[in-house]
Image: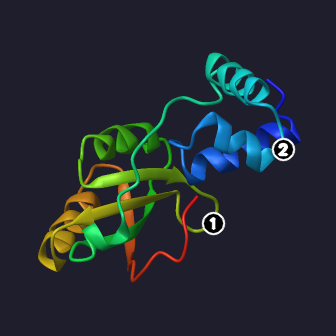
Amino acid sequence: MKITEADEQLLSLLREDARASTAQIARRLDLSRTTVQSRIDRLERSGVIRGYTVRVDEGVERDRIRAHIMITVFPKKTAAVVKELHSIPEIRTLQSVSGPYDLVAMAVVADVDQMDLLTDRIGALDGVERTSSSIVLSTKFER
């Protein structure tokens, strides 16, 4: 499905606040409510919008440790490693990336000791060559 500039603007507003009313979105986009609702319906039907989620305020997780864990995987082991990582609930997202690492995981745990255990657990997975972690200090913005 081809995404138009208007679709991009609509998706951007939904990323900011998926609970915004159709009327609020329509005002911001200078479109009719019917047009906005039709676009949302079309994006949902086509699978562009796969669902809606909750973003928790950073203050709620301020006492938790968040980290990006960069992971290098041995050739031909990526699928197995991804499957194992998917089963670890502390990993919130996993992305395939270019560069010296193959995967980047965003992990959230209660304290530094748990992050240490988690990174050891990831490093011990069959197929993982090495890991490197960066603790997140703050989030400047999120869309």
Q: Nearer the viewer, residue 36 or 130?
A: 36
Q: Nearer the viewer, residue 56 or 83?
A: 56
Label 2 is placed on what type of residue? Asp
Q: Residue furthest bottom?
A: 137
Query: From the viewer's perspective, is 135 left or right of 18?
Result: left
Instruction: Give the residue number, with chain letter if any, for mark 2.
Output: 30
Q: Nearer the viewer, residue 125 or 119?
A: 119
Instruction: Say whether residue 90 is left or right of residue 49.
Output: left
Residue 131, by quadrant, is bottom left
In the structure shown, which secondary structural element does the residue marked by tag 1 occupy? loop
Question: How packed is label 2: few (under 14 Cα within 10 Å), some, or many (20 or more)?
Answer: few
Q: Amino acid at mark 1?
A: Gly
Residue 116 percent across, percent down from the top left: 19, 74
Q: Residues within 10 Å of mark 1 (few under 14, many from 20)?
A: few
Q: At 71% across and 19% down in the image, what residue appears?
A: 42
Query: In terms of image quadrants, where is residue 136?
Result: bottom left
Residue where numbered disc 1 is placed: 99
Q: Quadrant of the N terminus?
A: top right
The location of residue 69, given as percent across then percent down, is 39, 67
Q: Identify the coloring.
A: rainbow
Q: Residue at x 27, y 58 (%)?
A: 122
Q: Is residue 67 left or right of residue 88?
A: right
Q: Upstream in the sequence, badge 2 or badge 1?
A: 2
